[in-house]
Amino acid sequence: MAGMLDFVLPGRSSESIGVMEEKQFPAWSSSVEQCLKEFNVKLEKGLNSYDVDKRRKQYGWNELRKEKGKALWWLVLEQFDDVLVKILLGAAIISFALAYLHGRESGMTGFEVYVEPIVIILILMLNAFVGVWQESNAEKALEALKSMQCEHAKVLREGYYVPNLPARELVPGDVVELGVGDKVPADMRVVSLRTSTLRIEQSSLTGESMPVIKGTNPVSIDDCELQGKECMLFSGTTVVNGGCVGIVTSTGMNTEIGKIQTQIHEASLVENDTPLKKKLDEFGSKLSTAIGLVCLVVWAINYKNFITWDYVGFFPSNFRFSFEKCTYYFKIAVALAVAAVPEGLPAVITTCLALGTRKMVQNNAIVRKLPSVETLGCTTVICSDKTGTLTTNQMSVSEFFTLGGKTAIHRVFHVEGTTYNPRDGSIADWNYYNMDANLYILAQICALCNDAGIFCNGHLFRSSGLPTEAALKVLVEKMGVPDTKARSRIRAAQLAFEHSIDHSTAKLGCCEWWKKRSRRVATLEFDRVRKSMSVIVRELTGNNRLLVKGAVESVVERSSFVQLADGSVAEMDMSCRQLILTKLHEMSSKGLRCLGFAYKDDLGEFSDYYADTHPAHKKLLDPSNYSEIENNMVFIGVIGLRDPPREEVPKAILDCRGAGIKVIVITGDNKSTAEAICSEIGLFSDSTSLKGRSFTCKEFSSLPFGKQVEILSKPGGLVFSRAEPKHKQDIVRLLKESGEIVAMTGDGVNDAPALKLADIGISMGITGTEVAKQASDMVLADDNFSTIVAAVAEGRSIYNNMKSFIRYMISSNMGEVISIFLTAALGIPECLIPVQLLWVNLVTDGPPATALGFNPPDLDIMQRSPRNSDDSLINSWVLFRYMVIGSYVGLATVGIFILWYTQPSILGIDFASDGHTMVSFAELQSWRECPTWEDFFPSPFLAGNNVVFFSDPCDYFTVGKVKAMTLSLSVLVSIEMFNSLNALSEENSLLQMPPWTNPWLLVAMAISFGLHLVILYVPFLASVFGVVPLNFSEWFLVILVSAPVVVIDEVLKYIGKKQRWRTDKSKTS
């Protein structure tokens, strides 16, 4: 029991458990005074040393707990918890014992005796190494999480600020000061602002696409979602604008990032087998049962050879038991079992998956865990983040409008392009020469009332500062400038930039042109009350102008006039105001984030403002005066921005629908934005009502369990907004419990637990945090949803190819089993020895089996529904087919062995030309009684360039079988080469899918056959493998006996197709 508790709660003391379980103080819904009282601290003094020590004993250090990982020896042992691996391990042990006994009997003690068990053990060791490497890699997510934590903080202790206190020493109640660029060291309650605006980048934690504004006012809801806690700062997030003072409310594992670590750890404890592992385990169990039965039958049918008796009347008596013969036939049965085990299967599966990962890398999908390649192929649900996956994660202007010649007329301009590249798209029907006064001022405001920048990372344009402001600067570049000469210089500079080596800084020539014409002299920062930002600029004329941008309703409310297209100013009447607000509602319903623009020339005491030495500067120090300054403005227009969907996403969504894959969008953004984007990408058809398909995660969580399952079971798309980490996990867990195979995408820290829990976690390579990447199974190098769909198609193709080579290897092994079975049943000498069987299974079969992994995908692969997770690797019809094929392989392999001993010629080919002695089939069956035969003196015969002599006549059936054994081995190899052609397609004939559709298979066949020739014609290898060279006529016979396997399988494919056609026809009728 204690062990269980240690497992569930590793590393926690009883004291820390109590701390974790006590109810957290709702600092977000409490006033600053209540927070100070709760934490017993004064804002001007901070904590003293006694308080710090006392609280550290209660709460511990401010650091993430080091989860106890699995011991290396346990990781190694886990790799052997696989049915197929256990079968191979058993085969290796038995093979080693048999090799030892054989060595003692024959007097051989060299390496060649133990080749088989050593090779099997090496394969298992390699398999274990790969598994341990993957497992240890997966747990790096927790280490990556720790790198997000802040190392130092500016903390108030005993009335003095400690500038670089190690962040791990923070305790609840500490007073911390933060500025631009600082990483938040613990969860904190904002108690005072150092600037008028405080913006925090917390997208990695909450999934919000924009930095959020924080303040000191409490939130009235106790049970509030993370995004709604506007007075709270969370550990690991970053200050991008402004400064503040806060009180630490939670440290270490009690912070939001600590809770995520706990969720990642809990998710990593839920170890579900991949669909492939389940299938292979099921296949391994059936295989072991079949092998056991066949061994028992082979041993039992030879009982008369080791148990004899006499009859007295009708009853048997005088039983005699030969232990030596009993052991001999037991060894034969075990040898058969070893032959039945596909030793090369784990290696070929690993190779096929590795080849799949290489193909996926070429398509921008980096697979971190090999089994994930195949898991993708049976994915039934993709849970996707919105920002950066379905969208570009680059804000861009979609459209803007200004007034026309009258206050009742407006003009709409549509903007192309979805990135921060100024050359990406243009403004529809735009004419630089006709930039009127209205558009002129709009461009001026966008360029100057703006603190963002754009830089180029390689050939990818990025923003610094607020994404919305960066998008406005891109718009200015697309609008151009009215000055013809300046426009020519700007275009030349852009061309020079495109061909330059240094792409670190993007050249924004139009914005620079505006800056030279108007110098900024003051900034009125954004605040939550007036919801706008403005700058005072001094123009070339020497006059000052106020340029304003902000929330449209707020800007319209404080505007008294509007500017028309000809530059004239008219009073804003009620109908004009209504026109602007109606257009605003229309743009917002498309999911656009709208900004209003205005200016003011009559600035009163600020008309000649020039610097902070001006008498009116004191008024600018108090943000409460800004609304008065931004009053009686002239309204210019509205710009609509958005994080646009990627161009290729709608087709990918359509492909998912055709492939029977449900897409669910889970995002931290607000509901209306999520709905608009999902409608645009085609997740919902135009006729689909969003009722019952779009929920905030809070709404969904409040529904009864049965209703939640019902919603998730509906066909068609779903969208969940305002999601927190726990919500994502809950949705993934519900889907998995319903039997779905879930792929989950994400880029932030908040996504890591769900990525870990999903059947396949997919993180973003460009925008993704290191935590998300380490927790995932696959990383998208281009952050693109369509890459996932391409990877699903590749996964399906890999599974089909895997089935091809598994069927190929099993049918080949069936042939080997049947040949040994026939040998034992007929009582003839062994036609194949263990080292030859191992050579066929590992070396000769390996290249063709691997090459089958290169089979081209079926054309309709993404028009089929995902395969059922209960589907068998080999169904009853395919099993029957390969029993027939295996029977032919066995008959041909044993048959040619018997023919060499008993027939002087076959089909006109002279078998006796080498001079060997013919025996009857009955004599061959009773070869063990050879010592009792009289007048049996076999002649020496020619084998290659050597003559085989016999010191003992009975050696003719042991040493003398070398030529017959070579013929059997060559037939087995040749049949398996032809059989690999059968495995090109489970259903299609070689006439429909000829061998050259997979040229790699032809190369592999040539390699395998070449290797077989090497062991035949290199003397040293020939002696190791017990074979001799064959002449031309003997090779002709080998090919003649082997080729019919193709005809047999073609007939079986035809019968199977006919049967399936009749079944489909009866279902239709």
Image (cartoon, rainbow, N blue to C red):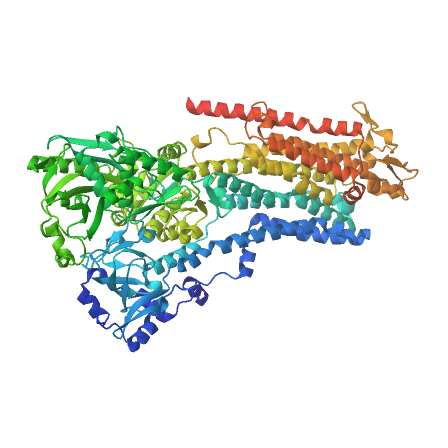
Q: Quadrant of residue 975?
A: top right
| Count of numbered marks | 0
Which residue occupies the foreground of this view, 323 or 186?
A: 186
User: Does 117 appear above or below 832?
Assistant: below
In which quadrant is the N terminus drawn? bottom left
Does 94 sit left or right of 465 as displayed? right
Which residue occupies the foreground of this view, 881 or 230?
A: 230
What x and y, as percent, mark residue 955?
A: 86, 42
Does 270 sit left or right of 831 as displayed? left
Which residue occupies the foreground of this view, 96 or 71?
A: 71
Q: Outermost residue, right direction?
A: 935
What x and y, as percent, mark residue 464?
A: 32, 49
Which residue occupies the foreground of this view, 573 or 34?
A: 573
Does 663 sit left or right of 961 as displayed? left
What x and y, as percent, mark residue 810?
A: 61, 38
Q: Is residue 917 among what the camera can see?
A: yes
Q: Is residue 170 among what the camera can see?
A: no
In which quadrant is the C terminus drawn? top left
Q: Quadrant of residue 182?
A: bottom left
Q: Quadrant of residue 411?
A: top left
Q: Outermost residue, bottom direction?
A: 50
What x and y, as percent, mark residue 672?
A: 24, 41
The residue at the point 66 percent across, 28 percent down is: 1045
